[in-house]
Image: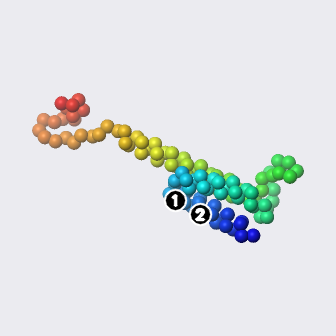
Amino acid sequence: MVVIPLTVLALLVACAGALLRPRWDVAVLAGLLAAVWTRVNQPVEGRVLVSFSATRGFTEADLLSVAALLVAGTALLRCAVAGVRRHRSRHRAPVLPLRGPGLTRAAVRHGR
């Protein structure tokens, strides 16, 4: 089975990239890989931690998906905060330098 190690490797690389340099596309990729992991982890699931029914449950291997989703959510949140900061810094009023005799801060503020 080559699919399981490749999926884990891709998931870990995407999560590391999302944590080191948060970008929305890498965060979405980490979230998608977390969903893929829940489908391919059946041979390595481990113990059932929570049973939902006789055939469905939350296993030890599913913890990796939960961690990857938390990383992806954190990266998306960091991207959103950075976007808001960039937007606010672009729309601030410019600060005029104080030059010349007789110029005070009040005169500059009022356009005199």
Determine the residue located farthest toward the left in the rendered image.
101
Secondary structure of the residue carrying numbered label 1:
helix
From this viewpoint, is residue 71 visible? no
Q: Is residue 20 left or right of residue 12?
A: left
Instruction: Give the image location of residue 14, x and y in percent.
Output: 59, 60
Q: Label 1 belongs to which residue?
A: 20
Instruction: Give the image location of residue 52, x and y in percent.
Output: 82, 47
Which quadrant of the figure contains the C terminus?
Answer: top left
Q: Quadrant of residue 97?
A: top left
Distance from label 2 to label 1 (Cα)?
Answer: 10 Å
Position of residue 108 relative to residue 58, above or below, is above
Image point (61%, 56%), residue name? 30
Determine the residue located farthest toward the right in the rendered image.
54
> Circle 2: is it few (<14), some (14-19), or many (20+) Cα within 10 Å?
some
Pick whichever of labels 2 and 1 is earlier in the sequence: 2
Q: Quadrant of residue 33?
A: bottom right
Q: Quadrant of residue 11?
A: bottom right
Q: Is residue 86 left or right of residue 4?
A: left
Circle count = 2
Q: Label 2 belongs to which residue?
A: 13
Way the structure is coloured: rainbow
Instruction: Give the image location of residue 86, x and y in percent.
Output: 42, 45
Which amino acid is tagged 1?
Leu
Pick the front one: 108 or 9? 9
Image point (56%, 56%), residue name? 26
Q: Are marks 2 and 1 in contact (CB under 8 Å)?
A: no
Which quadrant of the figure contains the N terminus?
Answer: bottom right
Q: Is residue 90 left or right of residue 80?
A: left
> Circle 1: is it few (<14), some (14-19), or many (20+) Cα within 10 Å?
few
Image point (74%, 60%), residue name? 40
